[in-house]
Image (tube, rainbow, N blue to C red):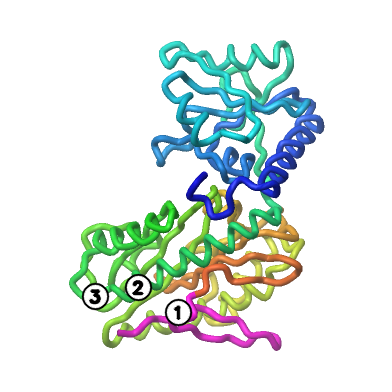
Amino acid sequence: MKDDPFGLDKDRLAELSAKRRKVAAFLAEEGLDAILIARHENIAWLTAGLVDVRVGMLRESGPACLLITREGAAYYLTTNNEAQRLADEEFAGLGFEPVVKPWHANDLRASVNSIVGSGIAAGDMGQEGCRTASIQRLRSELTYGEAERYRWLGWHAAEAAAVVLRRFEPGMSERALQAMLAEQLIGRGILPSVYLTSTDARVTQYPHPVPRAGVLKQLGMLCFCARRWGLTVSMTRFVGFGPLPAVFEEHLAVVTQVNAHLLGATREGATSDALFAVAKQAYALLGHAGAELLHHQGGATGYLEREWFARPGGAERITAQQALAWNPNLRGAKVEDTYLLQGGELKLLTATPELPSVTTTLNGSEYRSADILRR
């Protein structure tokens, strides 16, 4: 926690306690006595972003999990080879009691039973002997502390993106672009979780052009998701060298307008179904009916890259304080940024004012979208 710019202050501890009470209330509502929490996004949420138990960063879980009881007691269950580091660097001062078992004889169910007894326990990953329970809805409305951490994350991720984009040069490989992005983000304490550093034809050919053997000639895309404290931001920027294909520029103009429609509809209470309909109607109005079916258009973000997508029939609703990341796209042309809805206003978290942008006026309001950096 020494490198955490927010630290373990009274507000962070209050957030942590409030979330434990929220889980205890959830258990009472569901008729459960305890819940075993192993998914990394749930652990990050419950611990106010202070704990990540994973060793392998590509895993959904790590060598420890949390157990919260209806009475509000909190434990972390782990093994002897992990216990010291977790005690020193993850759980110090957080009020969780350790339950430690030998790494070669770790019976998770027995550990749960030793605390819960004959009570009913649930698990967020369908752990053996536990009912399956999702606490995703508990994460939907951000706390004040989460909003503040989101601002820090968005600003620093955008700063890293601007640095990297200006370093793009013809002849660079997609792997080299990926490495530059990783260096800039990780150096700021931010962990990339999705890399879409791609070039030229691969940008327009695939919805998710992960880095491969491409070499930059005219068009480069810097698209990524990255996280800190469990929170995730997403953004996309383009750089062009010389004339670009006219169809790409036309498509970018279309998604810029679709982006304005989605931003204009982003308000508390809006459903994922209604937001999908907004995108659908905008594409049709702009002469590209059905484009919304080619790829998802984004949605709510938070402790996952997308907590939910705008989708037909979706019942999810935007909360009063929530992060959103729209990504309208058409054949590789895309607009993507992360916003915070707070106090009825949308606040851009991943702004890059030093890079080009375009303004769209819709229903009397102006909406800014990133444009191509031309070199």
Q: Earlier in the sequence, mark 2 or mark 1?
A: 2
Q: Above or below — where is 79 with respect to 48? A: above
Q: Above or below — where is 332 with respect to 315? A: below
Q: Nearer the viewer, residue 214 or 346?
A: 346
- Picture residue at 31% right of the left edge, 84% below the top: 244
Can see residue 291? no
In magenta stretch: residue 54: no
Mark pair 2, 3: CA separation:
9 Å
Mark pair 3, 1: CA separation:
22 Å
Q: Earlier in the sequence, mark 3 or mark 1?
A: 3
**Residue 357: image location, x then y, percent:** 48, 83
Q: Secondary structure at mark 1?
A: helix
Q: Nearer the viewer, residue 169 or 16?
A: 16
Circle nearer the viewer, 3 or 1: 3
**Residue 138: image location, x then y, percent:** 70, 44
Q: Which residues are magenta?
A: 352-375
- Picture residue at 29% right of the left edge, 87% below the top: 243
- Picture residue at 54% right of the left edge, 48% below the top: 230
Circle nearer the viewer, 2 or 1: 2
Q: Amino acid at mark 3?
A: Glu
Mark pair 2, 1: CA separation:
18 Å
Location of mark 3 (residue): 169
Q: Above or below — where is 328 with respect to 185? A: below
Question: Badge 2: how crowded within 10 Å, few (<14), some, or many (20+)?
Answer: many
Q: Secondary structure at mark 3?
A: loop
Location of mark 1 (residue): 252
Question: Badge 3: how crowded within 10 Å, few (<14), some, or many (20+)?
Answer: some
